[in-house]
Every structure is written in C-alpha cells, then in structure tokens.
Image (spheres, rainbow, N blue to C red):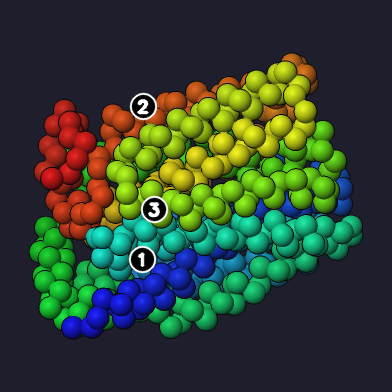
C-alpha cells in the first residue's frame, strides 16, 4: 500500500486541476464587476440592460445543467469538465472582441454554459474521488479556487481599468487559466464511481488503488458496487420519498445561496461603493479590494471550521451573521453614514458567507445523493441555482434604482435580504442533516431508509 503522503499528493493534484473550473467561475463573476462601469460608458446601458450584461452569463449557466443531464452521466465527469473548458475559451475570445452589447451578451451566455457545466461536474468529481475524512476540505478547495479567481480578477481589473480597450483585456485575460484547465483535464483520471457505474470496474479499481492503496480500494469498490446494485439511476429514483427529500433540500439550499444578497455585494461591489459616494472607475474597484482580501482569508479559515465544526452548526451560524450584515447595511444607508462605512456590513456579510454557507452549500449537495443519480440530481439542483441567480442578478439593479427613486436610498433591498437569510437559517435548522465524516454510500443509505417527510426527524445520519 502506498503511503498516506503519496496518496494525498495524488488526490491534491487531481483536485487542484478540477478546481480550476471554480477559479474561472470566480474570475468571471468579478471581472464583469470591474468592467461594468466601462461597459456602461462604452455601450450606454440602461439599468435593465446593465443588469442583463451581468446576468447573461448566469442565463447561460441555467442552460449548462440541462446539457449536463446527459453529459455527466453518459460521457463522464471528466469529459463534461473538458466541454466546459472549451465553452470558457470560446466565451473569452468572443467577449473580448465584441463590437455591440448584443455580441457581448451572446458570448457571455456561452461562458455561462461553461460555468453551469463546470460548477455541476467539478464538485461531483471531487466528492467522488475524496476519502470521507477529507471530502469536506477537498470540496472546499473548489471554493478556495473560486475565491483566488475573485481576488485575481479584482487586481487584474484595477490594472486594466483604463478607458477604451481596458474592459476587452479584462475578459481576454481569462485565456490563461482556461488553457491550464484544458491541459490539466487531459491528464487526470475519470471518477472511479462513474467508472464503476458504467461497468468499467478494472479502471475504477486502478484509480481507487492510487488514492487509498490496494486493500482499501477493494473494500471501497465492493461498497460502491453494493450501492449501485440497489439503484436504477433513473429520474424516477429521485421521486422516491427519501431521495425526494434530499432533492428538496439541495434545491432550496442552492436557491438560498443565490438570493441571500451576498453575491450581489460581490457582483456589484464597485457600483455599490460608487453609489455610497466613492467615485466610479478605478477608485471604486480599489476600494472593493478589502472585501475580496477578506473572503480569501475566510476561505482559508473555512478549512479549519469545516474540519472542527458540524455542517449544520456552521451553516446556521454563517447565515445568521449574513443577516446581521444586511441589517447594518440597511441602517447605514438610511442614516447616510460616511461612504467608507459601507465596507463594514459588506465585510460582515461576505466574510460570514465565505466561512460557512459558500463552501457548505456545495459540499452538502455534492454528497447527499446516491452514485447513479448524483449527476442528474446535481443538474436539477444547479438549474434552480442559476435560475435564481439570474433572477436576482437581473432584478438587483432595478430594485436598488426603484428604492433609491422612491425612498432616497436602497435600504429596503437589504431588509429583504436579511429576511431571506433568517428564513434560510430556520430551514437549515429544521431540515438539513449532519453528514460529516460519512462515506457517500452511508449517506445514500440514509435517504433510502426515509419513508416520508414525517419520518424525517433526525438531524444526524446514523
């Protein structure tokens, strides 16, 4: 058997490659934030069109999981990530060269398809290769990569924030990580659980042996095959009472992850700070840097929190502090406190989100479904995630404009977000089970043992 160190080194290398998709998601998410004021000036955007310039990628991300329904299960997790990478590349070139706002929207839509495919397949892939003791931390590597992408996008946006062609270089800069992703995916193996589900048992055993050593690999493969024998892999299986509850939890968690308001703080950070009194352009981008530095620090801290605390406890605490951040933001806007004070509630909200809800939402949905239906379930969950993200991204600038026009400030938006966060905390306390430290097969067996919602009264899976 290989040493623990060499096994972990092999796993870390694979996870690092798979998480580049998360990096591109974060980079793409924030580079549009830095470019938005320049796009507004260049294309003369209305508030609705400004929202659509941002949300067009999210609209594409809604489409990604629909393709992923077929790709993830039939082609495999690895090939699905490769297709996502090529979508990113096409979008990168097209967005940088766009001559009209509609050209820009079309290419951003294509990049969104890549986001939808990558953020559906990468967490599944990482979860399916990870030993139970490492799964939470390794899935969080995708979140860390996402945050690194966010921070790098802020820095790149600042240095490229010059008039005329600066925004084009912001989007074109994505070509470097996209090239690394394409190269890396060509070198990593397929998910052993997908291989086993598709009767490629020898290949599955080979990958598992590299991860855990021969003895543990054979035992794990036997456990996987036992579970696969109890599954059909059809959509009908997701309608079974226990799995229906798991799907309900996954969908609601992902919807909450997008409508809680913190993503809007990231997407529109320069615009929010500009509205608070900080000048539009490079200064607004520079002033938002503390937010992105904090989420990087909090993402690193999240590894320790995920290892030490329960999934449920960390999730509920995170969402509660996010609500507090929104309340302070609302009061700040109502009282017209100094512009830079706006950073404080933004730091509270984004910090709390990054410490708990951001990584845990992906960890939980990546681990609660059985092997054969995991791809289908994640596709459904991600469809709702991006649909809610599109709605929120599109509506946010119009909502803030409406509240500012009628009440002289946008505080009402943040009171709404605070209420949503409190509802999420209540939902997590009532419905989300504890899955820490369990194999994917143990978690799957738990859901199959639930007969109906009345039977769902356990907060810990046994």
The image shows residue 374, relative to residue 338, as above or below, that is below
Quadrant containing the N terminus is: bottom left
Q: Residue at x 62, y 37 (%)?
A: 346
User: Front-most of 457 and 240?
Assistant: 457
CA neighbours of label 3 inside 10 A, class few (<14), some (14 to 19), many (20+): few
Tell me the residue that label 3 is attached to: 304
SS assignment at label 2 = helix
Q: Are marks 2 and 1 in contact (CB under 8 Å)?
A: no
Quadrant containing the C terminus is: top left
Mark toward the viewer: 1 or 3: 3
SS assignment at label 1 = helix
The answer to whether residue 185 of the structure is visible from this angle is: yes
The image shows residue 417, relative to residue 200, as above or below, that is above
Q: Which of the two discs, 2 and 1, labels the residue nearer the N terminus?
A: 1
The reply, left or right, for residue 45 in relation to residue 455 is right
Q: Residue at x 45, y 30 (%)?
A: 320
Report the residue that reaches farthest toward the right: 164
The span from disc 1 to disc 3 (Cα, nearest Å) is 22 Å
User: Front-most of 137 and 404?
Assistant: 137
Mark toward the viewer: 3 or 2: 3
Image coordinates of residue 412 in percent, x first then y, are 64, 21
Q: Which of the two discs, 1 and 3, labels the residue nearer the N terminus?
A: 1
Q: Residue at x 55, y 63 (%)?
A: 23
Image coordinates of residue 202 in percent, x first then y, are 19, 83
Tell me the residue that label 2 is attached to: 426
Residue 188 tag number: none
Residue 125 tag number: 1
Image coordinates of residue 356 in percent, x first then y, are 43, 44
């Amino acid at each position: 058997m290989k040493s623990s160190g060499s096994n972990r080194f092999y796993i870390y290398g694979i996870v690092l490659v798979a998480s580049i998709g998360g990096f591109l998601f974060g980079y793409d998410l924030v580079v549009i934030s830095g470019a938005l004021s320049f796009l507004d000036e260049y294309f003369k955007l209305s508030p609705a069109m400004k929202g659509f310039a941002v949300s067009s990628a999210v609209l594409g991300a809604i489409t990604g999981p629909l393709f992923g329904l077929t790709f993830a299960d039939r082609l495999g997790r690895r090939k699905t990530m490769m297709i996502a990478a090529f979508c990113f590349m096409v979008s990168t070139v097209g967005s940088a060269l766009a001559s009209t706002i509609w050209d820009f929207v079309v290419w951003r839509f294509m990049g969104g398809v890549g986001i939808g495919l990558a953020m559906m397949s990468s967490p599944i892939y990482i979860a399916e290769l990870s030993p139970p003791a490492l799964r939470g931390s390794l899935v969080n590597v995708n979140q860390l990569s996402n945050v690194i992408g966010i921070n790098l996008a802020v820095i790149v946006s600042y240095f490229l924030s010059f008039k005329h062609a600066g925004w084009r270089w912001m989007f074109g800069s994505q070509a470097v990580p996209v090239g690394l992703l394409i190269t890396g995916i060509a070198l990593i193996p397929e998910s052993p659980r997908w291989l086993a589900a598709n009767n490629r048992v020898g290949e599955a055993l080979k990958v598992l042996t590299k991860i855990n050593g021969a003895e543990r690999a054979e035992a794990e493969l036997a456990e996987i095959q036992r579970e696969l024998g109890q599954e059909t892999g059809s959509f009908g299986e997701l309608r079974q009472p226990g799995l229906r509850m798991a799907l309900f939890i996954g969908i609601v968690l992902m919807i909450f992850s997008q409508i809680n308001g913190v993503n809007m703080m990231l997407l529109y950070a320069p615009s929010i700070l500009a509205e608070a009194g900080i000048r539009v352009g490079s200064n607004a981008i520079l002033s938002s840097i503390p937010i992105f530095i904090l989420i990087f620090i909090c993402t690193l801290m999240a590894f320790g929190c995920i290892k030490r605390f329960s999934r449920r406890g960390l999730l509920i605490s995170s969402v509660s502090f996010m609500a507090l951040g929104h309340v302070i933001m609302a009061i700040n806007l109502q009282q017209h406190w100094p512009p830079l004070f706006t950073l404080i509630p933004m730091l509270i909200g984004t910090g709390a989100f990054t410490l708990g809800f951001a990584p845990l939402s992906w960890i939980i949905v990546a681990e609660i479904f059985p092997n054969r239906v995991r791809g289908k379930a994640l596709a459904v969950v991600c469809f709702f995630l991006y649909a809610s993200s599109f709605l929120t991204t599109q509506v946010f600038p119009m909502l803030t404009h409406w509240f500012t026009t009628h009440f002289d400030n946008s505080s009402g938006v943040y009171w709404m977000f605070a209420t949503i966060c409190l509802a999420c905390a209540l939902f997590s306390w009532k419905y989300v089970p504890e899955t820490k430290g369990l194999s994917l097969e143990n978690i799957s067996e738990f859901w199959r043992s639930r007969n109906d919602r009345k039977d769902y009264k356990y907060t810990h899976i046994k």
